[in-house]
Amino acid sequence: MQTNTQTLARIPFFKDTTDVDFVQYDRRCNWKRYEDNETIVDFEDQTSDVYFILSGDVRVLIRTVSGKEVILAEMKAGQFFGEMSAIDSVARSANVTALTRSELCIMPASVFRELLFASRSTCEKVLRLLTGRIRESNARLTEYSVFDLKHRLYAELLRMAHPRAGHDGQKIVSPPPFHHVLAARIGCRREQVTRELSSLDHEGIVEKTRGGLVLVKPRTLETRLAEAMRSEG
């Protein structure tokens, strides 16, 4: 008997979920592969499906009134998006594009809501995730209101970085971010990012390696952010 690989039980989000009979939901979902640079959902789409990422990486963009695009997030396998439209049925507020070849499980909004009401553990996970995203959005809003360009860059680098194995106290952004991508994440021009990174490199605070952009002294960046915040107080 062949094992069904197209099941919600494969999705990391549902790991350790014991109060769901996945079989009744599996057949109501679709599984689809996307090539790199392929649009998954676009601005103002009227669809309301929820997308669970099984493999690959995607990028989430928003577009300002003036037409400028700002990168909100880059998401990996194990994460999902689209839950806002599934909950309120409002048109998509962001564009999501596959950065690499990706496989996604597409869950209709009706199935998503039914699952939330049927599973206490799933509902709690979604509530925690939504709360986390609101907190991050609030942090970004504060940064735009309080910080200048270089301090927004410090905050974004710290947010993107993770501990560097074998190097106590250091962090790394891997793979190394493109300057135009960093610029789109903090709302400035690529040339400004290049200039600020060169300054940090000269100070010995960051260092570019083959594996990524190393934050040699992340605590220095944290201290500068704290000082900038206090100066606004």
Image (cartoon, grey):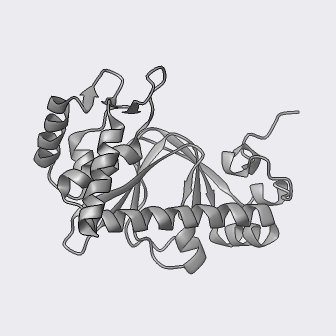
Of residues 205 and 233, the one nearer the viewer is 233
Task: Find residue 46 and report its horizontal and vertical position in percent.
Answer: 47, 74
Most extreme residue toward the right is: 1
Quarter containing the C terminus:
bottom left
In the image, is residue 112 above or below residue 173? below
Residue 128 image position (x, y, % from top left): 63, 63
Identified at 44% across, 41% down, the residue is 35
Q: At 40% across and 63% down in the image, what residue appears? A: 139
Foreground residue, 69 or 107?
Answer: 69
**The quadrant where residue 27 appears:** bottom right
Where's residue 212, x and y in %?
A: 34, 28
**In this rendering, does residue 156 appear at all?**
yes
Quadrant in which the N terminus is drawn: top right
In the image: residue 204, left or right of residue 3: left
Near-viewer residue (146 or 192): 146
At x 50% / y 39%, what residue is drawn?
Answer: 56
Judged left or right of residue 219, residue 28 is right
Q: Position of residue 222 (x, y in %)?
A: 34, 47
Asked if residue 46 is positioned above or below residue 192 in the image, the reply reads below
Residue 130 falls in image quadrant: bottom right
Mark yes or no: residue 184 visible.
Answer: no
Which residue is found at the position 14% from the left and 37% from the top? 199
126 lies left or right of 77:
right
Q: How many marks?
A: 0
Q: Does residue 194 sit above or below 129 in this rendering?
A: above
